[in-house]
Amino acid sequence: MALYDDPKKLYLREKLSCRAKVGSKVFTFDVRIQDIDTKGILTGIPDLGGPKLESGQEVLVRYYRQDSAYQFLTKVLGFEERVGPVVRIGFPSRITRYQRRTHTRAELGGTVRFMPNGQLTNQARGFVKDISAGGVQFSTQQAGMFNSGLPAVGTSIAMDFVLPGNHEFVGIVGFIRRVTKDEERPGFVRVQVEFTKISPRAAERMELISRKAARGL
Protein backbone atom coordinates (compact mmCIF):
# COMPACT_ATOMS: atom_id res chain seq x y z
CA MET A 1 0.00 0.00 0.00
CA ALA A 2 1.33 3.44 -0.92
CA LEU A 3 1.88 5.92 1.85
CA TYR A 4 -0.91 8.44 2.38
CA ASP A 5 -2.85 6.72 -0.42
CA ASP A 6 -6.35 7.24 1.07
CA PRO A 7 -7.67 10.59 -0.20
CA LYS A 8 -10.49 10.61 2.35
CA LYS A 9 -8.29 10.16 5.42
CA LEU A 10 -6.26 12.78 7.28
CA TYR A 11 -3.21 11.91 9.39
CA LEU A 12 -1.56 13.23 12.54
CA ARG A 13 1.26 15.69 11.78
CA GLU A 14 0.01 16.11 8.21
CA LYS A 15 0.46 19.56 6.71
CA LEU A 16 -2.68 21.45 5.67
CA SER A 17 -2.45 24.42 3.31
CA CYS A 18 -5.26 26.84 4.20
CA ARG A 19 -6.91 30.00 2.97
CA ALA A 20 -9.22 32.24 5.00
CA LYS A 21 -10.66 35.74 4.64
CA VAL A 22 -10.07 37.77 7.79
CA GLY A 23 -11.61 41.22 7.59
CA SER A 24 -11.00 42.52 4.07
CA LYS A 25 -7.89 40.44 3.41
CA VAL A 26 -7.37 36.84 2.30
CA PHE A 27 -4.59 34.98 4.11
CA THR A 28 -2.87 31.76 3.13
CA PHE A 29 -1.07 29.70 5.78
CA ASP A 30 0.12 26.19 6.59
CA VAL A 31 -0.67 24.28 9.78
CA ARG A 32 -0.14 20.72 10.95
CA ILE A 33 -2.71 18.37 12.41
CA GLN A 34 -2.00 17.93 16.11
CA ASP A 35 -4.94 15.71 17.00
CA ILE A 36 -8.15 14.25 15.58
CA ASP A 37 -11.08 13.33 17.81
CA THR A 38 -14.83 12.88 17.52
CA LYS A 39 -15.42 16.64 17.61
CA GLY A 40 -13.07 17.73 14.84
CA ILE A 41 -9.51 18.40 13.76
CA LEU A 42 -7.03 20.23 15.99
CA THR A 43 -4.21 22.24 14.43
CA GLY A 44 -1.75 24.91 15.45
CA ILE A 45 -2.93 28.52 15.39
CA PRO A 46 -1.41 30.40 12.42
CA ASP A 47 0.41 33.70 12.85
CA LEU A 48 -1.29 36.09 10.44
CA GLY A 49 0.78 39.09 11.49
CA GLY A 50 -1.93 40.72 13.58
CA PRO A 51 -5.39 39.56 12.46
CA LYS A 52 -6.71 36.38 14.07
CA LEU A 53 -9.06 33.60 13.09
CA GLU A 54 -12.44 33.68 14.78
CA SER A 55 -15.04 31.04 15.61
CA GLY A 56 -17.42 30.43 12.72
CA GLN A 57 -14.90 31.57 10.11
CA GLU A 58 -14.78 29.62 6.86
CA VAL A 59 -11.45 28.04 5.92
CA LEU A 60 -10.53 26.40 2.62
CA VAL A 61 -8.19 23.48 3.34
CA ARG A 62 -5.95 21.71 0.85
CA TYR A 63 -3.78 18.63 1.31
CA TYR A 64 -1.81 16.31 -0.92
CA ARG A 65 -1.47 12.70 -1.90
CA GLN A 66 1.08 11.12 -4.19
CA ASP A 67 -0.89 11.67 -7.40
CA SER A 68 -3.32 14.47 -6.62
CA ALA A 69 -4.24 17.41 -4.43
CA TYR A 70 -7.54 17.62 -2.52
CA GLN A 71 -9.54 20.35 -0.81
CA PHE A 72 -12.54 20.90 1.42
CA LEU A 73 -14.36 23.83 2.97
CA THR A 74 -14.80 23.91 6.73
CA LYS A 75 -15.27 26.29 9.65
CA VAL A 76 -13.40 27.24 12.80
CA LEU A 77 -15.25 25.60 15.69
CA GLY A 78 -13.26 27.16 18.51
CA PHE A 79 -9.96 27.37 20.34
CA GLU A 80 -8.45 25.22 23.09
CA GLU A 81 -5.36 24.99 25.25
CA ARG A 82 -3.51 21.67 25.18
CA VAL A 83 0.27 21.50 25.12
CA GLY A 84 -0.15 24.94 23.58
CA PRO A 85 -3.00 26.89 21.98
CA VAL A 86 -4.79 25.06 19.17
CA VAL A 87 -7.70 25.77 16.84
CA ARG A 88 -10.44 23.22 16.17
CA ILE A 89 -11.88 22.99 12.67
CA GLY A 90 -14.81 20.86 11.54
CA PHE A 91 -14.62 17.60 9.63
CA PRO A 92 -15.09 17.96 5.87
CA SER A 93 -18.60 17.26 4.60
CA ARG A 94 -17.26 16.94 1.07
CA ILE A 95 -13.74 16.44 -0.28
CA THR A 96 -12.92 17.22 -3.90
CA ARG A 97 -9.84 16.62 -6.00
CA TYR A 98 -8.82 19.94 -7.51
CA GLN A 99 -5.48 19.13 -9.11
CA ARG A 100 -3.42 16.19 -10.25
CA ARG A 101 0.17 16.05 -9.14
CA THR A 102 2.51 17.73 -11.58
CA HIS A 103 5.49 15.54 -10.67
CA THR A 104 6.03 12.11 -12.15
CA ARG A 105 6.73 9.48 -9.50
CA ALA A 106 8.60 6.38 -10.59
CA GLU A 107 9.91 3.26 -8.91
CA LEU A 108 13.63 3.75 -9.13
CA GLY A 109 16.66 2.23 -7.47
CA GLY A 110 19.60 4.12 -6.06
CA THR A 111 21.00 5.03 -2.68
CA VAL A 112 20.36 7.86 -0.25
CA ARG A 113 22.55 9.30 2.47
CA PHE A 114 20.43 11.12 5.01
CA MET A 115 20.75 13.21 8.16
CA PRO A 116 17.56 13.57 10.25
CA ASN A 117 17.00 16.89 12.05
CA GLY A 118 20.11 18.42 10.48
CA GLN A 119 22.39 16.18 12.58
CA LEU A 120 25.44 16.33 10.32
CA THR A 121 27.37 13.92 12.53
CA ASN A 122 24.55 11.37 12.56
CA GLN A 123 24.44 10.12 8.97
CA ALA A 124 22.96 6.90 7.63
CA ARG A 125 22.15 5.27 4.31
CA GLY A 126 19.15 3.72 2.63
CA PHE A 127 17.74 2.45 -0.65
CA VAL A 128 15.48 4.54 -2.89
CA LYS A 129 12.06 2.94 -3.50
CA ASP A 130 10.44 5.65 -5.61
CA ILE A 131 11.17 9.29 -6.29
CA SER A 132 9.87 12.42 -8.04
CA ALA A 133 10.83 16.07 -8.20
CA GLY A 134 8.56 16.60 -5.18
CA GLY A 135 9.59 13.82 -2.82
CA VAL A 136 11.08 10.40 -2.19
CA GLN A 137 10.33 7.15 -0.43
CA PHE A 138 13.31 5.15 0.78
CA SER A 139 14.03 2.07 2.88
CA THR A 140 16.62 1.97 5.66
CA GLN A 141 17.72 -0.35 8.42
CA GLN A 142 18.32 2.59 10.77
CA ALA A 143 14.85 2.38 12.33
CA GLY A 144 16.08 3.76 15.66
CA MET A 145 16.84 7.12 14.07
CA PHE A 146 13.12 7.65 13.50
CA ASN A 147 11.87 6.94 17.03
CA SER A 148 9.39 4.25 15.94
CA GLY A 149 7.63 6.49 13.45
CA LEU A 150 5.27 9.16 14.75
CA PRO A 151 7.72 11.43 16.63
CA ALA A 152 9.78 11.72 13.44
CA VAL A 153 6.86 12.82 11.28
CA GLY A 154 7.07 16.50 10.40
CA THR A 155 10.76 16.84 11.26
CA SER A 156 13.46 17.97 8.85
CA ILE A 157 15.80 15.66 6.97
CA ALA A 158 18.75 16.43 4.66
CA MET A 159 19.58 14.00 1.85
CA ASP A 160 22.06 13.19 -0.91
CA PHE A 161 21.12 10.76 -3.70
CA VAL A 162 22.91 8.61 -6.24
CA LEU A 163 20.37 7.34 -8.79
CA PRO A 164 20.84 4.77 -11.58
CA GLY A 165 23.05 6.10 -14.36
CA ASN A 166 25.30 7.72 -11.74
CA HIS A 167 23.03 10.75 -11.38
CA GLU A 168 23.99 12.57 -8.16
CA PHE A 169 21.92 15.05 -6.16
CA VAL A 170 23.27 16.73 -3.04
CA GLY A 171 21.93 19.05 -0.36
CA ILE A 172 18.22 18.30 -0.80
CA VAL A 173 16.11 19.04 2.27
CA GLY A 174 12.62 17.83 3.11
CA PHE A 175 10.29 16.93 5.96
CA ILE A 176 9.28 13.43 6.95
CA ARG A 177 5.66 12.64 6.10
CA ARG A 178 5.42 9.06 7.30
CA VAL A 179 7.46 6.14 8.64
CA THR A 180 6.24 2.54 8.34
CA LYS A 181 7.65 -0.98 8.47
CA ASP A 182 9.14 -2.22 5.22
CA GLU A 183 7.28 -5.47 4.69
CA GLU A 184 9.75 -6.49 1.98
CA ARG A 185 12.82 -6.13 4.21
CA PRO A 186 12.64 -7.43 7.82
CA GLY A 187 14.19 -4.94 10.22
CA PHE A 188 13.89 -2.03 7.76
CA VAL A 189 11.52 0.94 7.72
CA ARG A 190 10.15 2.95 4.80
CA VAL A 191 10.41 6.72 5.08
CA GLN A 192 8.34 9.09 2.95
CA VAL A 193 9.74 12.59 2.53
CA GLU A 194 8.36 15.71 0.85
CA PHE A 195 11.05 18.00 -0.52
CA THR A 196 11.13 21.55 0.83
CA LYS A 197 14.50 22.65 -0.58
CA ILE A 198 15.63 21.55 -4.03
CA SER A 199 17.13 23.76 -6.73
CA PRO A 200 15.08 24.33 -9.92
CA ARG A 201 17.84 22.68 -11.95
CA ALA A 202 17.93 19.61 -9.71
CA ALA A 203 14.12 19.35 -9.77
CA GLU A 204 14.15 19.52 -13.56
CA ARG A 205 16.80 16.79 -13.79
CA MET A 206 14.93 14.59 -11.33
CA GLU A 207 11.65 15.04 -13.21
CA LEU A 208 13.34 14.00 -16.46
CA ILE A 209 14.86 10.90 -14.83
CA SER A 210 11.50 9.96 -13.26
CA ARG A 211 9.63 10.34 -16.55
CA LYS A 212 12.11 8.13 -18.37
CA ALA A 213 11.95 5.50 -15.63
CA ALA A 214 8.13 5.59 -15.63
CA ARG A 215 8.18 4.91 -19.37
CA GLY A 216 10.70 2.12 -18.95
CA LEU A 217 13.45 3.95 -20.84
Image (cartoon, grey):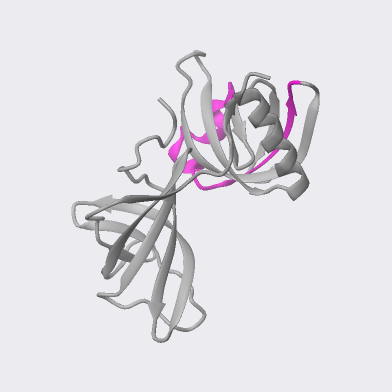
**Viewer can see residue 89:** yes
| Viewer-side residue, 170 vs 44 | 170
Seen in the picture, residue 178 relative to 69 is either above or below; the reply is above
Point out residue 147 in the picture as x, y percentages from the top left corner: 50, 35
**In this rendering, would 182 be left or right of 90?**
right
Q: In x, y percent, where is residue 76?
A: 28, 69
Answer above or below: position of 132 versus 30.
Answer: above
Q: Quadrant of residue 84?
A: bottom left
Please state, as top left, top right, bottom left or bottom right, where the C terminus lies in the image.
top right
- Is 153 inside the magenta-drawn segment? yes
**Residue 24, image quadrant:** bottom left
Which quadrant is the N terminus positioned in? top left
Q: Is residue 214 left or right of residue 122?
A: left
Q: Quadrant of residue 206?
A: top right
The residue furthest left is 38
> Relative to the observer, which residue lies in front, 197 or 188?
197
**Can see residue 128?**
no
Asked if residue 43 is among those painted magenta in the image, a careful observer would answer no
Q: Is residue 78 above or below residue 149?
A: below
Please name the residue shown 46% across and 35% down the image.
149
Residue for point 48% across, 84% down: 50
* Residue 140 percent location from the top left of the image: 59, 23
Residues shaded magenta: 139-164
Residue at the far bottom in the pictured view: 24
Left or right: residue 108 compared with residue 69: right
Report the residue at 49% width, 13% height from top.
Answer: 184
Q: Residue at x 38, y 60 (%)?
A: 61
Please provide percent x and percent y for residue 70.
39, 50
